[in-house]
């Protein structure tokens, strides 16, 4: 895959939404306004994709509540209208069908599904693959939304035998369009896993790093993967009301442009 297509994905970690146990009563229109502003900052900084996530809902359910799905649709529509780059959706701990429904409604380009196939064990119990439900929702809506699947979900323990098996099944059985790799050992461990997967998967499979990337590791990430998902590293604080730091966002975008231009002569 051409390095000029390297995906720099910025995640908007939304504050607790209606339907969450820790929802604090903040108006959805205010959440949507702030999210659209942060999305515009990321687009201006050079990010190629934006993803919205109900990341602050705690405890996070495997499948989202109906009010949460409604709120995410409102926020997502506002974000999509504010920028001209692809938007993605991730819902709950593993609500792939809801993510597809929201993506279809707001004309988003992709969804992230953390356990598309197989089974994981996490704080909320067993998390079962939802590829059948995702495929059914896509068919019901006539949706062509891309599905980006985690090989192993980062906050649970996969019962699959290996990451290679999980990635192959996500593609072959689950119909995934891209594979996301996150390692507890950090970026360099994720890059090692990606290198091993390249020989086991179809050669055109996009392989992205799902987190724990910093400004210091961006150069290595660009060399060894097809994209990176950045969320917490962009925040100006650790609170629910954290916003995207424009200076940090600009640095991520600048590194992408500089590295691709210098090493690959890419048009970015």
Image (cartoon, rainbow, N blue to C red):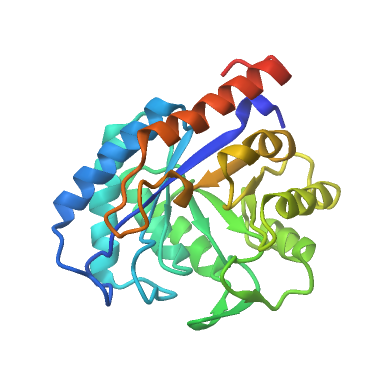
Expressed as whole percent of the image width and height from the top left, the position of residue 59 reads 38, 77
Quarter residue 37 falls in: top left
Residue 202 visible to the viewer: yes
Question: Residue placed farthest to the bottom in the image?
Answer: 125
Q: Residue at x 31, y 46 (%)?
A: 243
Q: Position of residue 80 (x, y in %)?
A: 31, 39
User: Is residue 266 shown above or below 147?
Assistant: above
Which percent across, then down, holds residue 4?
A: 64, 24
Along the viewing direction, whichever of 235 and 170 lies nearer the viewer: 235
127, 40: nearer the viewer: 40
In this rendering, position of residue 185 left or right of residue 150 = right
Residue under the point 29% across and 56% down: 72
Q: Nearer the viewer, residue 194 or 65?
A: 194
**The image quarter in which residue 85 lies:** top left
Q: Please state, as top left, top right, bottom left or bottom right, where the C terminus lies in the image.
A: top right
Taking 3 as reference, is 36 above or below it? below
Q: Which residue appears at 44% of the width and 29% of the height?
A: 250
Q: Position of residue 24 (x, y in %)?
A: 18, 68
- Image-based side of 264 in relation to 244, left or right: right
Q: Taking 158 as reference, is 246 left or right?
A: left
Q: Residue at x 28, y 73 (%)?
A: 20
């Amino acid at each position: 895959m051409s390095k000029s297509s390297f995906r720099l994905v910025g995640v908007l970690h939304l504050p607790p939404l209606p339907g969450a146990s820790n929802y604090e009563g903040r108006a959805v229109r205010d959440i949507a306004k702030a999210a659209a502003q942060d999305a515009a900052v990321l687009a201006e900084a050079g990010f190629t994709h934006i993803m919205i996530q109900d990341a602050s809902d705690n405890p996070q359910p495997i499948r989202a509540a109906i009010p949460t799905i409604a709120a995410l649709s409102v926020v997502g529509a506002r974000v999509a209208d504010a920028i001209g780059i692809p938007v993605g959706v991730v819902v709950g701990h593993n609500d792939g069908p809801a993510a597809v429904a929201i993506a279809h409604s707001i004309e988003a380009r992709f969804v992230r599904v953390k356990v598309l196939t197989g089974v994981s064990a996490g704080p909320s119990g067993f998390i079962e693959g939802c590829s059948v439900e995702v495929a059914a929702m896509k068919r019901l809506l006539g949706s062509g939304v891309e599905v980006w699947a985690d090989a192993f979900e980062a906050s649970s323990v996969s019962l699959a035998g290996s990451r290679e098996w999980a990635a192959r099944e996500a593609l072959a059985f689950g119909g995934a369009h891209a594979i996301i790799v996150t390692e507890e050992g950090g970026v360099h461990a994720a890059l090692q896993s990606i290198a091993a997967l390249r020989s086991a998967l179809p050669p055109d499979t996009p392989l992205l790093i799902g987190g724990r990337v910093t400004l210091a590791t961006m150069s290595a990430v660009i060399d060894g993967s097809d994209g990176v998902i950045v969320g917490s590293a962009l925040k100006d604080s650790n609170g629910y009301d954290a916003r995207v730091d424009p200076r940090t966002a600009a640095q991520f975008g600048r590194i992408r442009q500089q590295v691709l231009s210098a090493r690959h002569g890419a048009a970015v």
